[in-house]
Amino acid sequence: MAKDYVVKDISLASFGRKELDIAETEMPGLMSLRAEYGEVKPLKGSRIVGSLHMTIQTAVLIETLVDLGADVRWASCNIFSTQDHAAAAIADAGVPVFAIKGQTLEEHWDYLDKSFMFEEGPNLILDDGGDATLYILLGARAEAGEDVIAVPTSEEEEVIKAQIAKRMAASPGWFSKMRDQIKGVSEETTTGVNRLYQLVKDGHLPFPAINVNDSVTKSKFDNKYGCKESLVDGIRRATDTMMAGKVAVVCGYGDVGKGSAASLRGAGARVKVTEVDPICALQAAMDGFEVVVLEDVIDSADLFITTTGNKDVIRIEHMRAMKDMAIVGNIGHFDNEIQVAQLKNHKWTNIKEQVDMIEMPSGNRIILLSEGRLLNLGNATGHPSFVMSASFTNQVLAQMELWLKGDEYNNDVYILPKHLDEKVARLHLDRIGVKLTKLDEDQASYIGVKPEGPYKPEHYRY
Ligand code: NAI
C-alpha cells in the first residue's frame, strides 16, 4: 500500500515513541479518558480531521482519540510547530499525518487538504486557529461563486486561493460535500474561536462548534501557565540572550499576555506591558507592571513580544525605531501581529532555523524569531505535557459530545458544561499531590451548591 503520510524522517519514530511514553506519564487527563472509555469506544465511526501543532503532546491526543474508536488524519496548523519525531511516531503507528517542521505555506495548505482525504470523507474537525474550518467554508463559497472571506495575511490569501482552485479543478463539488457531512468542530484557541463567533454573526457557520479555548481548564491554564513556561524557553533556545536586567515589552495582557509577562519577570527581565483594554491595563499595573504605549519605549527596550491575537501591533515604523539588536517575537496565533511582510525588502541574515537578523535603513539590526509566527512552538517545543493534558482532555470531551449528541445542537458556538470543566481539573490533581477539601451538606447548602459540584455559577470568572 502506498504510504499515507508526509513526515520529515520516519526513522525518527523510535525517538518520538520514547518521548511519547514520557509525555503519557504527564498527561493524566488523557490517560484517564483512555481508561474510562477505551473499552466502550464512544468515537467509533467518527472520522476526525485534526489541524493542530503536530507535537509530542498532540501525539498523545491523537492516540487517545484512536483508542476511543476514532479514525484520524492530521496536519499541523503552523509551518514551524511540528516536532518531526512526534510526526514520525504517529505515522509509524499507522495514523496518516502530514506535517514537517519548516514546511512551506503551499505545503501547509496542501497537507491540510490531504488530511481531509478519508475514503468516505471526514465527519468531525478538531481545529486550532480555524484553518481546517476556513478551508472548507472558503472552498464551499468559491464553489457557490461567492467571494471568499478575508484571511489573516495577504500572502496567505493567494496561497489559499490557489489550493482551493486546485481542489475545485480536481474534484468539483468537493467542498460543499465536505461542509455538509461535517457534524461539528471543536476549536482550540482564542483566534480560532473569534473566527467562529464572527461566522455565527454573519450567518455562515454550517455546523455546531465547541469552543474549547474558553473552558476554564484551557484558557486559564494553557494560555497562562503554558506561556509562562514556553515563552522564555523559546527566546532562550533562539538567542541564548541574558534576560535578567533587560527591558521586555509584552503587547497585550490577556491570558497569554499574563503568562508571558510572568515568564519574562521570572527570568529577571524588567517587564512593561501595553494594552488597549482598561480592565487588562489595570490588572497589569496592579500585578506590578508598568503600562506604557509602545512608542514611548520603542527605542529603549531590548525585547518585544506580541500576545494580542490582533494585527499590525508592531509595525514597520516601530521596528525601524528599535535599538540595535532588539529581539522581536510573537506568541499569538498568527504572524500578522508583527508587520513581517513589510520587512521583506530589507537585508535578512539567517542565523539558524527560525532566527533571522534583519537590517534597518539606519543600520540597526533586529533579531526576529520564527518569522513572526508563534515563537514558543517555532523556537521551542511549546507548552509542557501536563498543561496540554488539560487542554486536550477538553478537546476529547468536545469531540465525544459532537459525535454522540451533535444533532441536538444548533449551528452555534458552545462551551462545555462546568461539571466537565471541573472534571478535567480533578483529573490533574493526583499527579501533583493536590488534596481537595470536601464540602459537607450543610456548608454546600449555605453557599448554594452541591457537595459534588459544580462549585461556581456560570458568571464566575476565576
Ligand atoms: P485575550 O483576548 O485574552 O488577550 C489578548 C489581549 O490583547 C486583550 O486583553 C486585548 O485587549 C489586547 N490587545 C488587543 N489589541 C491590542 C493592541 N493593539 N495593543 C495591545 N493590546 C492589545 O487572548 P489570549 O487568550 O491571551 O490569546 C492571545 C493570542 O494567543 C491568540 O491569538 C491566541 O490564539 C494565541 N494563543 C497562543 C498560544 C501559544 O502557545 N502560542 C496559546 C494560547 C493562545
Image (cartoon, rainbow, N blue to C red):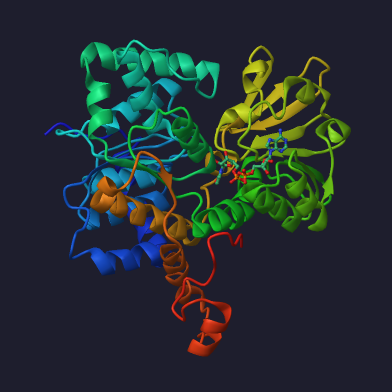
Q: Quadrant of ligand 1?
A: top right
Left or right of 422? Residue 182 is left
Q: Taking the image as drawn, is residue 146 in sight?
A: yes
Across and down, in percent, residue 401 comes to 31, 53
In the picture, the quarter occupied by the N terminus is: top left
Question: How many marks on residues?
Answer: 0
Viewer-proximal residue, 165 or 300? 165
Across and down, in percent, residue 144 comes to 31, 14
Viewer-proximal residue, 266 or 71? 71
Please report the residue visible at 78 percent of the width from the left and 25 percent of the height from the top. Answer: 318
Q: Taking the image as drawn, is residue 299 in sight?
A: no
Q: Based on the displayed image, in which of its 4 quarters is residue 322 positioned?
A: top right
In the picture, the quarter occupied by the C terminus is: bottom right
Left or right of 389? Residue 321 is right
Across and down, in percent, residue 147 comes to 42, 12
Q: Is residue 254 above or below residue 171?
A: below
Across and down, in percent, residue 348 comes to 66, 20
Please report the residue visible at 50 percent of the width from the left and 22 percent of the height from the top. Answer: 151
Give the farthest residue toward the left.
1
Please report the residue visible at 76 percent of the width from the left and 54 percent of the height from the top. Answer: 283
Viewer-proximal residue, 400 or 26? 400
Q: Is residue 11 above or below residue 181?
A: below
Please report the residue visible at 36 percent of the width from the left and 38 percent of the height from the top. Answer: 411
Left or right of 334? Residue 282 is right
Q: Is residue 282 above or below residue 159?
A: below
